Each structure stands twice: as C-alpha cells, then as structure tokens.
Amino acid sequence: MLLVRRFEERVLQLFTRGELFGTTHTYIGQEANAVAVLNHLEERDIVFSNHRCHGHYLVRTGDAEGLFGEMMGKAEGICGGRGGSQHLCRDNFFSNGILGSTAPIAAGMTLAEKLKGSDAIGALFLGDGALGEGIVYETLNLISLWKIPLLIVVENNYYAQTTPLKTHFAGSFTDRAKAFHIEADEFKSNDVEFLYEGISDIVEDIRRNQRPRFLVLHTYRLSAHSKGDDFRPADEIKHWTEKDPLKILKPRLKSNIAESLEQEVKRVLSYAEEAAREMPFPSLNESQPQPEYCLEMVRQ
Amino acid sequence: MLLVRRFEERVLQLFTRGELFGTTHTYIGQEANAVAVLNHLEERDIVFSNHRCHGHYLVRTGDAEGLFGEMMGKAEGICGGRGGSQHLCRDNFFSNGILGSTAPIAAGMTLAEKLKGSDAIGALFLGDGALGEGIVYETLNLISLWKIPLLIVVENNYYAQTTPLKTHFAGSFTDRAKAFHIEADEFKSNDVEFLYEGISDIVEDIRRNQRPRFLVLHTYRLSAHSKGDDFRPADEIKHWTEKDPLKILKPRLKSNIAESLEQEVKRVLSYAEEAAREMPFPSLNESQPQPEYCLEMVRQ
Amino acid sequence: MRYFESLNAALHQLMREDERVYVMGEDILDPYGGAFKVTKGLSESFPGRTLTTPVSEAAITGIAIGMAMRGLKPVLEIMFGDFVTLIADQLVNSAVKFNWMYNHQVSVPLVIRVPMGGRRGYGPTHSQTLESMFMGVPGLKIIAPSHYHNPGDLLKYAVSKNNQPLMFIENKRLYPQKLVTVDSVGKAGDFYIKQLANGENGYPTISLSLMKNEPPQVTLITYGGMAPFAIEAAMEVFMNEEILVEILLPSALKPLPVKDILPSVRTTGKVVVAEEGVKTSGWGAELASVLNKNAFNQLKCPVERVGAKEFPIPSSMPLEKEILPGAEDIVEAITLLMGD
Amino acid sequence: MRYFESLNAALHQLMREDERVYVMGEDILDPYGGAFKVTKGLSESFPGRTLTTPVSEAAITGIAIGMAMRGLKPVLEIMFGDFVTLIADQLVNSAVKFNWMYNHQVSVPLVIRVPMGGRRGYGPTHSQTLESMFMGVPGLKIIAPSHYHNPGDLLKYAVSKNNQPLMFIENKRLYPQKLVTVDSVGKAGDFYIKQLANGENGYPTISLSLMKNEPPQVTLITYGGMAPFAIEAAMEVFMNEEILVEILLPSALKPLPVKDILPSVRTTGKVVVAEEGVKTSGWGAELASVLNKNAFNQLKCPVERVGAKEFPIPSSMPLEKEILPGAEDIVEAITLLMGD
Ligand SMILES: Cc1ncc(C[n+]2csc(CCOP(=O)(O)OP(=O)(O)O)c2C)c(N)n1
Ligand SMILES: Cc1ncc(C[n+]2csc(CCOP(=O)(O)OP(=O)(O)O)c2C)c(N)n1
Ligand SMILES: [Mg+2]
Ligand SMILES: [Mg+2]
C-alpha cells in the first residue's frame, strides 16, 4: 500500500519534470481496495484492470521498475513502452483504456480457464463511471448464465472524471448486479484489514462454487482524475483525507516498523526509478519487422 | 386486433406465393399487447417498434395498404419500398431492424419533445431477446437520470428467435429496470381488456409526472419466428393456443358482431392487398438523384 | 457440395480434431443450426463446445477474445454482417491491438465468421457489405472466399494456422451455391481455372480465363459474392465483342495478395475492380491505389471501379438491383476500358 | 485566436443564436469545460442546453439522433476519437440511414465532434485517427479543418446549414495552435494562401504556395493535423532542392472536393497524399483512386501515399514517431516523385 502511494507521488513529480509520456490516473486514496482484493488471489488467477491501474499492478507484481520504465516509454518497460500508463500486461495481469470493454474479455479469459479445468478465477476492476457502458450489462447477463467465476470489483470513488456520481448514475450499484441474479456486496471503508476480512468469503465462494460475484467498494481518490485540475469541493476532499487508508493503518504499526517500511519503499523506488531511467528507448526495427499484412510492394 | 391477425395471415400466404421481398416476423398471438398499449397513446406521442412491427403499425395507423405495399417493395408503400417489413416510418411511428439500437433514439425523440415543451410521451417496444443488448441499459440509466417520459414495453414471448428465455436471460425483467430506479410492472395475460385497464395508470403517470416506466408483458407468438421452421415443443404451442387473445375476446362479442367484423376486415384487407399489388415499383431515378456526396467526377 | 455445406463440414472437422475449437454465436444450436445453417449438427456432436449466446454481439466478441487469449480457438458467428458495427470496438480497440500493444505476451487467434451481402430483400439493416470499414485496421486479416475457392479449406486454415484476429466474410447469396469443381483438363464450365499463390499462405487467388494460351486483354478483379456476376460479364463481353478477360478472385482481402494480381495487370494494362460494397473508400480504392503505384507504367487507362451506389440497401428488389452492382455494370466498365 | 478557442466561440455563438442547438458529451460542464476545453463556458451561459452525460457513447449518440429527428440541433462531443468504434452502429445503421430509408420523412442534422490523432503519448486507445473507417458510409459527411481554415466558421456552417449526420474531426495537436491569418498581400508566413471553392459548399480547400506566379511541380494533398508537417516538408524541399510544392488542405474529407484538387494535379502531374491515419485503405486510397481516374493522362508518376505504419499507436514517443508520418516522410515521397 505504501509502495503504491509513494510510487504514485513520484509519478506525479516525474510528470511535472516532463520525464513521462502521455497521461496518468493515480490511485492515491484507493489503495486499500487493491490490497484487500488482490491478496486473496492466486498467481494463476486473472486480473483485468482499467485506466487507474498502477495500484492494482504494483500490488499484484511489485514491479515498480517495469512500470516506471513503461511510463517513461522504455524498451524494457512492461510492454516495451508500447502501452504506457493504462495498457499493461504481465503474466496474468492486464489493463486497457476503453472503459467497460474489458468486462467480456475478462469473462472470456476466466471462462477459458474454467473450460480447461483449471480452478483459476478472474477479477475485473471497474469504476463507477464505467458502469455507464452497456457492455458491462451484457457481460453480467453472460457470466450469470454461464456461471463464470469472475469477481467484478466496482471501485466507486463518486466521480467519473469530473462528473459526480449523482449526475451520471441512477439507481443502485448492487441492484444492477442482482437484477441478473448475481450476488452483490458493498463495503464503504478504507480500512484495509476490515476489507481484507470481508472479501475473503467472497473470493472463496467464487472459486468453490464457480459462479460470479459483484463487489462494490465505496472510496475516494485523493488526487486529481489525471494530472490536471481538480474541481471537487475542498471540504469533501478534506473529509476523505481523514479516511486516507494509510492514515487508518499507520497507528496499527509500531512506529519503528512504519519508519523502516518508509525507508525500504524509498530505497526500492529510487532504485526502480533510476533503473528505468537507464533503460533504452525502443525502436521499431528492433522490436518487429513491418508485419506481413502490409504488403504494398516496393516500387519497380 | 382482428385486422392485425388477418393481415399477418395474408402476409404468410403472400410469402408462400412469392409476392413479398425479404423476410417477415409475424405478431400472431401477441396482438393484445399492441392494442392495449397503443390505444392509450395520443397522435403526438412517439412509438418506436422493432422487427416484429406489423401489429404495432396497424394498431397505430390502420394503414394495411401502405404496409402491404411496403412489403411488396412498391413505390407507394410506407417508405417507398425502401424499408420493407422491419424498417417502417409514418408520422410518429418508427421501426428499425437492429435490436436494442432503437432504445436511445426513442429516448432522444421523447426528450426533444419534453425540451420543446410538448407533452408528448414515447413508447418503445422491445422483445426479451433485445434485452441482451447493452445499449438498453445505457438508455435505462439515461432516461432515469434525465426523467424522460418514455414507456419501455418489453414483450416477453419466451424466445429470442430460437433461443428459449432461460438460455439467453438471467435474472428478472422488472429488477433490471428497478436497478436504475425506474418503476416497473408486469402482466401475464392475453386478455386485451384486462391489459388495457392495467396500463391506463402507467401511461397517465408517465405523461403527468414526466418520468419513464418499464412494462413487461409476458405473452407468446403463435407462429414461427419468421417465415421458417418452428422447433418449439408442440404442447407448449398448444398450451398458448388456448390463450390466443382472439379466443379470449371472441366470447365477449355478440356473434353477429364478430361475424360482421370478420367480413369488414376481410373487405378492407382484400382491398388493401389489391391496391398494393397495383402500385408501381420504385426506381432510383424517380426517387432521388445520386446524392451530392458521390462526387467522383465523370471521365474526361 | 454447396458453399454452406463446405463450411459446415469444416467446422465439424475442426471441432473433431482440436478440442480447443469452440463455436459460438446466436441461435446456432440444433435443430435450427444457425441462421444460415453453417453450424448445423455441431451442438449435437459437440454440445459442450457449441455455445449459443444471448443477443449481445459486443460481449460475445469480448468473450471470444478472452478465450483466444487463453489458448482456445473460438470461431464466432455474427448472425448478419450488418452487426459488425456493434463489435467494432472489441475488434479495433482490443482484439487486434493486444498482441503488439502487450509486446507479444499474448495472441488472439480469433476467427469471426460474418455473412455479408444483399440481394435477398432483407433491407437496409440486413444486407450490407461492410468489410471495407475494417480494411485499414492494423493487425486484422480479412478473408472472403468465393464458390471457386474451397471455403471449408480456407476456414480450416484460418482456424488452425492463424494466430491473429481474422474476419471471415461469407456472402449470403453464395451459401446455396454449388462449389465449382475443376475437370481433368483444368476447366470449370467454359473457364480454365488456375490457383495462384498455390497454398503459399493458405488463401489462394483463383484465376479464370476462357482461353488457355491467349493473353487476356482485361483483368477483372473481384471477390466473394461478385464472382457469379464476373463470370456472366466475362462471358458476355467475349460472346458479343470477343474481349478476353482474365478474372482474378482473391480470397484474401487484407492483406491484399498483390503478388497474385500484378502479373495479369502488367500484361493487360486494363483493370476493372468490382465489389458489392459501396465504391467510395471500398476494397477497390486500396487496390486501385496499389496498382497505380506498382503497375503505373503498364496501366493503359485508369482502373475502373465497380461497386454499390451510395445509398442504404433497400428492401424492394428492383430498387436494390439499381443500387447494387451487377454483371451489366461490369460489362459497362470493361467496354469503357476497351474504348481507350 | 487558437484552434480550440475558435471552436469554443463558435459553439457560444451557435447556442446564443439558435435555441435548438444543444451541446452534449462527457465531462463538458464548467469549470472543467470538456477534456479539450472546447465546450468551456457553455454550461454557465446555457445551462439547460449543455448536457453532460454518463460514460455511454453509444446511447448518447442515439439520444442525439433522436433529438435531431425532432427538430433540435445537437452537437455531440465524443471525448476521444478512438471511441467512435462504440458509436459505429448508431451512426451506420441508424443516423445515416433514416433519411433515405424512411423515404425522406425525417432528417438527422447531427454534428458529432471527434478529437482524433496522436503525438501526445496517450497510447494505443487514445491516439488513433479512425475517420477513414467511415469514408465509405453512405449519407455521412466528414469535415476536418486545419488551422489554416477557420474551424469555428466550419463548425457553424456544419451545425446551421447541414441536414445530415456529420463527423467533425479535430486533430488534438491542433487545439493549442494559433489560427493562421493572411496578411494584406495574401500571405501567411512564407506561403501565399488561396481559398478554393470559396465558400461554395461552406467547406473550403486551402491552397498554399511559396511562389505566386510560378507553376508548382508537385501537389501535396493533406488535411487537419498533418498541415504543419506539410508546411515543414514543402519548405525543406524548396530550400534544399528548389522543388516548388503546392499544398492543398481540403476541409471536407467526404465528399472529396475533387473539383478543388484536380486543377493543381493536372498542372503538376505529381502528387503526394498524406494523412495521419494508417495508409492502407485510408483517405488517401480513395483520393489516389479518384485521381488515377480523373487525371490519368496528366499523372507523370504514381500518386505517393504517406500515412501511418500498420501498428497500434504506442505510448512511447520515439516509437510513436517512427509509426506516425512526419515531415521527413513527406519529403521522402516528394523526392521520390521528383526522381521520376
Ligand atoms: C469508453 C471510454 N469512454 C470515455 C473514456 C474517458 N475516460 C477515462 S477515465 C473516465 C472516467 C472514469 O470514471 P470511473 O469509471 O468512475 O473511474 P475513475 O476514474 O473514477 O477511477 C473517462 C470518462 C474512456 N477511457 N473510455
Ligand atoms: C443487433 C441484432 N442482433 C441480432 C439480430 C437478429 N435477430 C432478429 S430478431 C432476433 C430475436 C429477437 O428476439 P426478441 O427480442 O425476443 O423478439 P421476438 O422476435 O421474440 O419478438 C434476432 C436475434 C438483430 N436483428 N439485431
Ligand atoms: Mg469513479
Ligand atoms: Mg422474444
């Protein structure tokens, strides 16, 4: 959790210094979700994340170096610099930048595992905004009908980009899943230990009973949507700053442990950042010949 | 209701005789729905129908001649023969052949009327199968958020083409709307008078309170999906034949009235069919010059 | 054997021989067996691997993509080609991108079967020829056999030898057509048949000529459902005006089999490109541009393109006939070229 | 005035002058004012007619279609052009068909604004140039102003004078660019500027030349976000090799303004067509085919097409630069032509 937070803080600095390409969406404030969910999963399980994927990725893989490299557009980044911040892939971890489009794909991967007789399950992360996309409901119907062991995690941070929940969302989160006969739960907490406990049975049930579940985690992002401006009310942000998951956790750690964790994370991240900085940039020639399907012939 | 039934029976005969183009989806068995819903609407209200639209169209307009002409591909058909069976438009009546795609369009037309200060409402017909399309849920969210006075009528005939409901549909019809905070009702009856009564308040509420409603009508089609084979169990069809809406209504009519209705419908339809047969075929030159956007110039 | 039977037999064989093959789509179960019967019998023989789906084109495409990413070989039927608009995002922003964007960590061997085309009176939303929308999508293959090809063989090749998203176009009017068989002297009907790029990449181009040793005067390039009209037109201009046409029927639309096409074009210098889809920015636009570039000095006159007029496809058959290209349009184009 | 400011001012004026105009899209409300600030201030001035929407591209397009059918004039923003895949069905199977298919009983005067293009490092799903997918869609207009046009004027024309679905392409890299103004002798920078088809159809083509009275040797046709690279390339070949290029910047992609283009092509006989999108089946494919047909005798060598290589658009800038076409690619194409 600390690693994610400190990573993201560096990312914002690197952007300011112009060392990163494109854009980014930081996970600051939502870290408890990734930790609580992903620590219940096995290596063989599939995780499909979204545009706000750094936290999910780091909790899953710990690979800060690869992610720094990817965001710096380097050949040794996770995807050779091709994907950038929101298009990641490593082992069983994936993310993509088209909201909602990931839902059936995650379902299909999970279904394939089920059909092959593996007991791997899938986890799909969506935001409240992504629930605006119709394909999510097509997928709910299908995973319910076909009993696909997929956990859909909706991280409701009360905003889709700049649009408040009540402006873009009608009705109830959990009812949207229950209408398809998918069991749905929700938690409103940034207490990682509490969440971890609560989610345990859900993941267990998915694996054991080979059926989908829907999990809504109400939370808040403490930084801007991407790098840019943040127009949310100051007192709202303040209210949630009190509930910062790190703040909740910290008092439970012995102070010297907290301190040494900070030091270790700092060391790891400094190293990773530096290593990424040293990586070469990719080039097309090295990376792949122009593919077969570009057949326009050379001039005579 | 009788007009619709006898029209469709003729349509099936005309297909057998090769007088019609393309394909068709008859409404036989579902007629009570169209009658019960559409008789509550005003002329200014908007109706958006689907592939199974003949019944809706005839109840709305009585225009058998135009529909025959359209299905025969004639220049004086409803849309000049361009649309054919499933792409109709006249006054405030519309249909289109892409399942679900009609939902936001009907919502947008209805919204426009609301924004213009008219008190027209909209009615959208969907089948159970069309609820597989994600765009329906995007629309549910929007009509709820924006309080669009649209009545969504789901005609559940327990099949999407050849696929039984339980193979393509998980969960509950009404819950799918309620999850978006849209009030939802359902009726399972082919008794047109009973339905007409039941729907009255719903339409009234939509118009008065300018909000959407969702109405599920469970019914059955007594003919094949289109012209082709019908693989449904014989006893299932038999069961529903007993509930044929015409059979339910007939005993309530004096027998001489029933008989004279039959005669009148026969006369009307014979006339309409013959008139359609006499119509000319369309041709491109008459109908429209090649549009401006085809600009490839003539050869020098 | 008919076109649809060839495809059906191929699916049976694929499923029999490779248990990673899954066939998916709307209404594909027996006894119905799919809107065009291509999937008939599969659900009886392979019930667990024949998945009939809800009416959710986008999501079932996504599910098939996911399955392909995990080592299965899904073959997805989109009931009518007009609905490819609904799967455009899954195709363009996911399926074709993943292999390269994820730096080759995954591949997506997905075959999507798409019945395209009009001339059945189905009207504006069930008659289109939309493959040209996807001709410019990097990472996608597009294959469209005619009845001079063996569609089943091509489908088998596509499913078993292919490692990327592939759109397999089947023209609806070809389904009931008998496959053309070549006799002992290499003829089918009046035409000598040659197979170009013989299996080189599994998607051969077929060449048809009325004379064996005489050089053709015009090259007519077309594909899929236009093949019967090409035959008709070639016969007509030969009978009436003794113009000798070589017909080329590529089965691959993307990548364009330029190597199969250039020799004939360089011989004749006169080219007609015909397609059922709209002419503007169609398949023929790319082809004409490529020929302009690669056979500039041999072209004696502009490449003539034949295609649909820019209208929706109407239901009324006489009107549809005016809008979709037919043999007369090809004849007219050939005659125009010969005037030069 | 900058490109995005011109569009923004146009929207303000449109909404002020016609209360049928509605502006819709994701995250368009103030103070944010839209992802690229084109809608800034609208929600403060016209709160009831500035509709921010859920993340539902397909449905909001449908809603806008419905509004247009009932006499309103919706202007819809799709936040990133990459998401046009999500609205493809609404566009292709509804919006563009209704007028003709319903026998002219309705019309759909819908303007969809679409920011396209890369070079910002946004990566594979936020950088594409996808308009060529829609070049062959009957009934659709596609407009794409450069900063040599007045994008605001074009948008105003599109909204107020147009009666059919129209895709309005805005290249993201142009947003911060200053609009080019022409001085008293008709020059902007080093170039003489002429406006072709002067307002004839409201979507003019701009011609740029380094010399006023000397005939150009090469015609370079491009649009939108490629304009700056065209300028750079034209300067370079002139400085280094004294090659005189006429640059043509159509603002209409569909229909192609063939009449604006032919005179220059017939003069030079040497043509480069450049676009940011993928070359295969791109805008240039149609254009090259049309030129092949309409200027066959004047073309001295093949039309050279410049476009993106067939890959997804990577996030890494150096890699993106290799894939997207730039000034060097245009220079190379010009040099090649001059070698003929
Ligand atoms: C299909 C699609 N539409 C729009 C966007 C642009 N976009 C990126 S993030 C975002 C808001 C997403 O909100 P939410 O799902 O709640 O996730 P959060 O950012 O709050 O974590 C939007 C609209 C996109 N990436 N994909
Ligand atoms: C987007 C789309 N997908 C598939 C089809 C083909 N199709 C036409 S009718 C139909 C079944 C529709 O079932 P339902 O909505 O229940 O209506 P019903 O036919 O039962 O009245 C299908 C799959 C279509 N027209 N549009
Ligand atoms: Mg959110
Ligand atoms: Mg049904």
Image (tube, coloured by chain):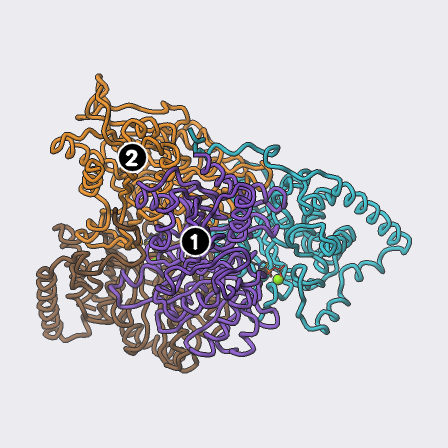
Chain colours: A cyan, B brown, C orange, D purple
Callout 1: few (<14), some (14-19), or many (20+) C-alpha neighbours within 10 Å? few
The picture places residue B27, in percent across and down from the top left corner, at: 25, 61
Secondary element at image label 2: strand
Q: Residue at x 77, y 41 (%)?
A: A275
The picture places residue B45, in percent across and down from the top left corner, at: 32, 76
Both marks 1 and 2 on one chain: no
Residue A62 visible in the picture: yes
Quarter of the image for the C terminus of chain D: give it: top left
Secondary element at image label 1: loop
Looking at the image, which is closer to me, C201 or C82? C201
Quarter of the image for the N terminus of chain D: give it: bottom right
Looking at the image, which is closer to me, A148 or B92? B92
Residue annotated with mark 1: D213
Q: Pick out the residue farthest to the top.
A: C184
Query: Regarding ligand 2, which quadrant of the image does it lie in?
Result: bottom left
Mark 1 Cβ inside 8 Å of ligand 1: no
Residue C181 - label = none
Residue annotated with mark 2: C221
Residue D197 shown left or right of residue D192 in the figure: left
Q: Does A9 sit above or below residue B146? A: above
Q: Callout 1: residue from which chain? A: D
Closer to viewer: mark 1 or mark 2? 1
Q: Does B13 sit above or below residue B46? A: above
Tag 1: residue type?
Asn
The picture places residue C213, in percent across and down from the top left corner, at: 22, 19
Mark 2 Cβ inside 8 Å of ligand 2: no
Q: Residue at x 25, y 49 (%)?
A: B298
